[in-house]
Image (cartoon, rainbow, N blue to C red):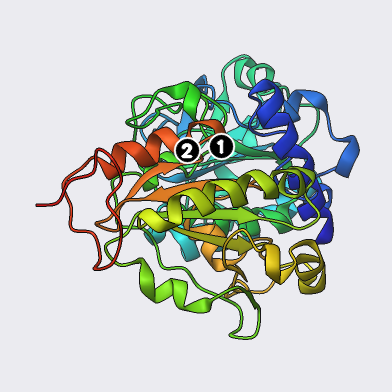
């Protein structure tokens, strides 16, 4: 579990430097060959899923495009492949368990040999998802396959999130992606109401982020009343105020470097009715967070995220519902409690807040009005 967190810490630097979103979202032990898995599979992650070229079907014909809006699992398999055959009962169980929650599976059989036995396997094992033959190896080539089975998991936006998973870890990824907001979209890189360059990743936004915008902000769930730096009453004082939620981790270099600037921003805008709240990685050592932020220099109240409901998930409950995958991530919520900017870059935060301040709305009693803000 700790490996996952350190992987994410390094990803956050990659995102800001070159716009790359996904370079290894899940722990190495989720994948065949672990850290040495093929570069061709790694390169798929964070990119829109490629179309599958299939020429024969057992079951209802479908496609990645038809299933967009669901979490899709593509299982590249073959009847001659022992591990593939051994994994089929797991596939069937996953479909039974999650199909009503928005998950779908497609089995893509090797084009070279073994297809003549596929129908018998489907019938004998009572496979409950469509199976098709790869058309001349086109899909295998497009997805950079080097072994069977190869599991590829695609999120609701049509973005590949994990490629080359071992069968026992497919469910862990499905659970995470099903919790994300989202649905069909004409463009997996859709941005929000602000310019694309204002967001981390630009046009290739973090999957799960865009689906939040314009919707009521999910609840913020905290680990413990004792794990707070600063005033915990900030949770109740947010009503009617613009809120900036920062997801952070004490061992993350960018978090550590940004604290002075964050404090300056919070000190400047808090008197004008803006609420700042930090949500710390639930896996962190709380003592690390406390030592990083001394009480007298606390930039804003910080609490620890609540542990996930199910053991084994690598993200806290709040991070999951907000679609957070890297630290730090900043989310801005307007006075009505709706998410307006998810994954906004720090140097554009002020402009977003000024935009929201200029909108009609009632400020809580006692708050100053910032230039440009107006009340109904």
Residue 329 appears at what percent x and percent y?
58, 46
Question: Residue 300 or 72: which is nearer the viewer?
Answer: 300
Tally of marks: 2
Circle 2 Cα neighbour tier, 10 Å, few/some/many (<14 / 14–19 / ≥20): some
Circle 1 Cα neighbour tier, 10 Å, few/some/many (<14 / 14–19 / ≥20): some
Apparent side of residue 374 relative to residue 208 in the rendered image (left or right): left
Task: Find residue 349 and name its label.
Answer: 2
Residue 176 appears at what percent x and percent y?
56, 56
Q: Which residue is drawn at 76% across and 58% down?
A: 250
Residue 252 appears at what percent x and percent y?
77, 49
> Can residue 296 be seen in the rendering of this structure?
yes
Q: Which residue lies furthest to the left in this view?
A: 376
Q: Classify 182 as above or below 65.
A: below
Task: Find residue 372 and name its label.
Answer: none
- Classify the position of the N terminus by image quarter: bottom right
Per the image, the residue denoted by label 1 is 346
Question: Residue 73 or 299: which is nearer the viewer?
Answer: 299
What whole-number distance in Å separates the C-alpha atoms at marks 2 and 1?
Answer: 5 Å
Residue 105 appears at what percent x and percent y?
51, 45
């Amino acid at each position: 579990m700790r490996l996952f967190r350190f992987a994410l810490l390094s990803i956050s630097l990659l995102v800001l430097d070159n716009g790359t979103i996904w370079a290894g979202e899940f722990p190495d032990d989720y994948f065949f060959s672990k850290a040495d898995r093929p570069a061709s599979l790694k390169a798929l992650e964070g990119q829109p899923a490629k179309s599958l070229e299939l020429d024969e079907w057992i079951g209802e014909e479908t496609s990645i495009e038809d299933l967009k809006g669901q979490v899709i699992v593509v299982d590249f398999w073959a009847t001659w492949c022992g591990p593939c055959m051994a994994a089929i009962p797991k596939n069937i169980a996953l479909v039974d368990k999650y199909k009503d929650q928005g998950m779908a599976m497609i089995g893509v059989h090797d084009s070279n040999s073994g297809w003549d036995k596929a129908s018998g396997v489907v019938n004998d094992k009572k496979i409950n998802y469509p199976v098709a033959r790869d058309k001349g190896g086109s899909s295998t080539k497009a997805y950079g396959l080097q072994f069977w089975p190869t599991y590829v998991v695609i999120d609701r936006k049509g973005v590949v999130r994990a490629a080359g998973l071992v069968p026992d870890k497919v469910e862990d990824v499905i659970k995470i992606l099903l919790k994300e907001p989202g649905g069909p979209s004409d463009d997996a890189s859709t941005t929000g109401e602000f310019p694309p360059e204002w967001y981390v990743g630009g046009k290739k936004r973090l999957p799960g982020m865009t689906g939040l915008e314009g919707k009521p902000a999910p609840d913020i769930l905290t680990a413990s009343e004792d794990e707070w730096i600063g005033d915990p009453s900030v949770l109740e004082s947010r009503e009617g105020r613009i809120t900036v939620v920062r997801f952070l981790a004490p061992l993350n270099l960018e978090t550590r470097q940004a604290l002075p600037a964050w404090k300056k921003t919070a000190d400047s805008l808090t008197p004008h009715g803006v609420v700042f709240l930090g949500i710390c990685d639930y896996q962190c050592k709380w003592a690390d967070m406390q030592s990083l932020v001394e009480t007298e220099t606390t930039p804003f109240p910080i609490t620890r995220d609540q542990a996930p409901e199910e053991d084994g998930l690598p993200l806290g409950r709040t991070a999951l519902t907000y679609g957070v995958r890297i630290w730090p991530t900043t989310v801005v919520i307007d006075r009505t409690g709706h998410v307006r900017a998810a994954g906004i870059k720090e140097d554009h935060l002020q402009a977003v807040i000024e935009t929201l301040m200029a909108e009609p709305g009632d400020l809580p009693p006692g708050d100053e009005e910032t230039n440009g803000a107006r009340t109904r």
